[in-house]
Amino acid sequence: MKKLNKRIVQRALEEFVENHKDGTAFVSIETGGDGRRRAEKEKKMIKGINGLLLIRDAIVTMAAEIYQYGWDADFCKKYLREKMYRYIEYYGSFDIQHLTESEAISLGFHRWDDTLWLIPLWMLPFLEKDQWVFCIGGEFKKIGDVDNDNRSGMLAYGIIPNPD
């Protein structure tokens, strides 16, 4: 596996942020090998599950920063709120109706029964509000109408993912 130098990674991240206004991004990554540098253009579409994975990683990073840096409560609340609004504006909303079981697992869904997989709380602000989900009580609701009550980070609502 080739190692990436910090300057190159920073440039790739800056390009990602600049180009990622519509849910897709094209990132250039320069790699080195055998003492010579060569540039390889990699185009990656960041949308759907990949966009949600990026968001989840960013949320985990925010939590780690808050814990590690020991910021005061007011600053933490402001920091989280601003970052979440920025992510919501930047990434928009996602449709989770066509996820496969392996995608649901990688995003942190938990199996409730043989068919229903519960939605992680962190994902709620990023979901399309007009998509239908199942409640553990048996009824259907639109995402925009569900509450954020959770147990162990899971909503009482979920989807039935497609088999792999």
Image (spheres, rainbow, N blue to C red):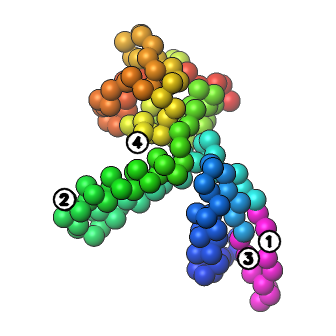
Determine the CA span between mark 4 and mark 2: 20 Å
Q: Please tell me whether residue 162 is drawn above or below residue 2 in the rendered image.
A: above
Residue at (29, 29) in percent of width and height? 149
Q: Name the residue under label 3.
A: 31
Question: Quick one: SS at disc 2?
Answer: helix
Q: Position of residue 23 (x, y in %)?
A: 62, 48
Q: Name the residue under label 1.
A: 40
Mark toward the start of the polypeptide (1 vs 2): 1
- Judging depth in this view, the residue of 75 and 154 nearest the camera is 75
Q: Name the residue under label 2.
A: 73
Q: Name the residue under label 4.
A: 122
* Residue 33 in sight: no
Determine the CA span between mark 1 and mark 2: 44 Å
* Residue 64 in sight: yes
The residue type indicated by label 1 comes to Glu
Q: Please tell me whether residue 20 is drawn above or below residue 48 in the rendered image.
A: below
The residue type indicated by label 2 comes to Ala
Q: Position of residue 62 (x, y in %)?
A: 37, 59
Mark toward the start of the polypeptide (3 vs 2): 3
Mark toward the start of the polypeptide (4 vs 2): 2
Question: Quick one: SS at disc 1?
Answer: strand
Q: Is residue 23 left or right of residue 44?
A: left
Residue contact between numbered discs 1 and 3, judged by CB atoms under 8 Å: yes
Mark toward the start of the polypeptide (1 vs 3): 3
Residue contact between numbered discs 3 and 2, judged by CB atoms under 8 Å: no
The residue type indicated by label 3 comes to Thr
Mark toward the start of the polypeptide (4 vs 1): 1
Magenta residues? Answer: 29-42
